[in-house]
């Protein structure tokens, strides 16, 4: 078995991964910005507003602060020890093979299941535009297009994501600009709204602290996806510097986009008018008189879904490739094309993703429903292992290679412990919430199954000297 190298032995920016180095800094920066701007923000935020009212601003601040802390930890480790497996490799170095195996396969499972949701969502929108093409036909088209893009060269993935993210970022900037003009009564047929909607309708916290807490549960998982930038950094010209710069720029801007959007939405419109499943962005654009607001947001959500599909296919293929590098996945997945692309890893990820799509199309309320529940809280388990890994690795890096700490976690170790406590609090809240409890229990079962497999592999390795296959 291939063991993860120690801190002193790990790759630096000058010691290349076997993959190509086709990603530029602009690709990573936009990947960091666009990776979490998706349907969860454009549509799903309505559910958060419905339960928290204007207090959704506080909910996003809390969830965003947690995501920022996790990314800072991950950025610290990835800039010091860049690797295509990112936090899976870090977990193996910090805690052992069982941890790298567990977090790697859990994250891969999360990505390929979510990939099915994104492909199906994009197909539903496209089918509404062109009903003559069946929904499965659109899914097949998207899978072929993005598989081809990921097989050709990593720079193709980078270019796709750059322009997808640029469109999403541009849409949010334009939305914020128009909304601010409407708030101050600058747009035609608008009057300054003041703070009526923030303080009326039951006050800033109409449902009290419990509403803010429910809002956190509704929005915290929308920040998932930032992790892919640390995976992608290993395929850049200067991984250590690239990931540090991408993490620094992304977390602040994303927090600004998310919190800024919620602030202008609940300022312009009464929170009680928001309904789960309906986009608050469409409601605002309709309110300020933008023609065709629904179709405009349909286009933006469509691009956001395809962008997430592309990023998840990339992230899942690199994660399973990294697992194969360390003997935690079939060695056949290590085959690399002349262009430095792990093609078999791409095929393996898209194959399982396509199976998930079929399950979603045929049994959305049974088999796929259970799969989706099984990954519902996996992100928190992954984040938890990232935090524990950082607690273990930071002292080692300071001892063995302090010059690699180009990006440091704030107030170490106190904020790392705060982040872990916050994750624990979210898990407890999910356990007490009727809607979230099934997701937590199924995710815990999936995590437990992976941990059992990891434990059996460790036992076999210790007794026979050979890993289980």
Image (cartoon, rainbow, N blue to C red):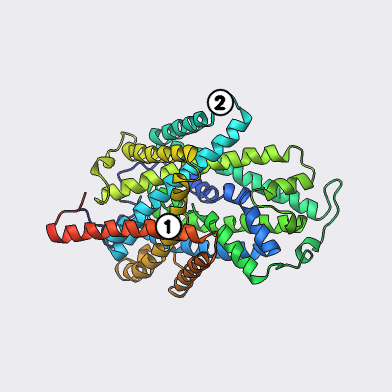
Q: Give residue 390's position: percent from left, percent from top.
A: 38, 66
Around disc 2, counting alpha carbons within 10 Å, would you say few (fewer than 14), some (14 to 19), or many (20 or more)? few
Q: Residue at x 84, y 53 (%)?
A: 185
Q: Give residue 347's position: percent from left, percent from top.
A: 35, 36
Q: Where on the picture, by quarter, is residue 79?
A: bottom left
Residue located farthest toward the left when viewing the structure as drawn: 464
> Is residue 213 or residue 289 the one in the foreground?
213
In the image, residue 315 sits, relative to residue 66, either above or below, namely above
Q: Mark 2 or 1 closer to N-term?
A: 2
- The residue under label 1 is 443
Around disc 1, counting alpha carbons within 10 Å, would you say few (fewer than 14), some (14 to 19), or many (20 or more)? many
Of helix, strand and loop, which one carries label 1?
A: helix
In the image, residue 342 sits, relative to residue 233, either above or below, namely above
User: So how many labels did they put on this image?
Assistant: 2
Q: Is residue 128 visible?
A: yes
Q: Give residue 303's position: percent from left, percent from top.
A: 57, 39
Of helix, strand and loop, which one carries label 2?
A: loop
Q: Give residue 159's position: percent from left, percent from top.
A: 49, 38
In the image, residue 96 sits, relative to residue 279, either above or below, namely below
Contact (CB < 8 A) between labels 2 and 1? Answer: no
Q: Residue at x 42, y 57 (%)?
A: 443
Residue located farthest toward the front when viewing the structure as drawn: 366
- The residue under label 2 is 133
Residue located farthest toward the top when viewing the structure as drawn: 132
Q: With 226 as the anchor, is 404 left or right in this view?
A: left
Q: With 36 as the anchor, is 345 left or right in this view?
A: left
> Is residue 313 or residue 424 the one in the foreground?
424
Marking on residue 249: none
Q: Where on the picture, by quarter, is residue 75?
A: bottom left
Q: Is residue 238 visible?
A: no
């Amino acid at each position: 078995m291939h063991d993860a190298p120690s801190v002193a032995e790990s790759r630096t920016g000058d010691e290349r991964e076997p993959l190509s180095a086709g990603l530029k800094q602009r690709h990573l920066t936009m990947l960091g910005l666009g990776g979490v701007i998706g349907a969860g923000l454009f549509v799903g935020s309505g559910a958060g507003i419905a339960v928290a009212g204007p207090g959704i601003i506080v909910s996003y601040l809390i969830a965003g602060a947690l995501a920022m802390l996790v990314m800072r930890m991950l950025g610290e480790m990835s800039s010091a020890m860049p690797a295509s497996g990112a936090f899976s490799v870090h977990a193996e170095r910090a805690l052992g093979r069982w941890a790298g195996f567990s977090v790697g396969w859990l994250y891969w499972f999360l990505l390929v299941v979510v990939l099915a949701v994104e492909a199906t969502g994009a197909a539903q929108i496209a089918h509404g535009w062109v009903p003559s093409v069946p929904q499965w036909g659109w899914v097949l088209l998207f899978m072929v297009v993005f598989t081809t893009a990921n097989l050709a060269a990593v720079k193709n993935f980078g270019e796709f994501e750059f322009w997808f993210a640029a469109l999403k970022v541009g849409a949010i900037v334009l939305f914020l600009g128009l909304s601010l003009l409407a708030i101050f009564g600058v747009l035609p047929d608008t009057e300054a709204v003041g703070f009526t909607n923030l303080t009326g309708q039951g006050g800033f916290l109409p449902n009290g602290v419990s509403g803010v807490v429910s809002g956190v549960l509704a929005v915290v998982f929308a920040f998932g996806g930032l992790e892919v930038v640390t995976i992608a950094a290993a395929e850049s010209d200067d991984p250590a510097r690239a990931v540090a710069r991408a993490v620094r720029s992304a977390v602040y801007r994303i927090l600004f986009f998310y919190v800024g959007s919620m602030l202008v939405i609940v300022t312009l419109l009464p929170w009680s008018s928001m309904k789960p499943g309906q986009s608050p962005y469409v409601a605002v654009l309709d309110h300020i008189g933008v023609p065709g607001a629904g179709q405009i947001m349909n286009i933006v959500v469509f691009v956001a879904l395809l962008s997430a599909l592309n990023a998840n296919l990339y992230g899942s293929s690199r994660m399973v490739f990294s697992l194969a590098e360390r003997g935690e996945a079939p060695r056949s997945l290590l085959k690399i094309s002349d262009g430095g692309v792990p093609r078999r890893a791409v095929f393996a990820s898209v194959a399982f993703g396509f199976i998930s799509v079929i399950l979603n199309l045929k049994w959305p309320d049974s088999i796929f429903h259970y799969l989706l529940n099984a990954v519902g809280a996996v992100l928190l388990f992954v984040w938890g292992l990232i935090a524990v890994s950082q607690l273990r690795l930071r002292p080692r890096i300071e001892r063995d290679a302090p010059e690699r700490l180009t990006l440091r976690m704030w107030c170490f170790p106190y904020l790392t412990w705060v982040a872990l406590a916050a994750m624990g609090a979210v898990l407890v809240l999910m356990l007490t919430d009727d809607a979230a409890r099934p997701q937590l229990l199924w995710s815990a079962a999936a995590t437990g199954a992976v941990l059992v497999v990891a434990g059996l592999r460790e036992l076999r390795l210790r007794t026979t000297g050979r890993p289980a296959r």
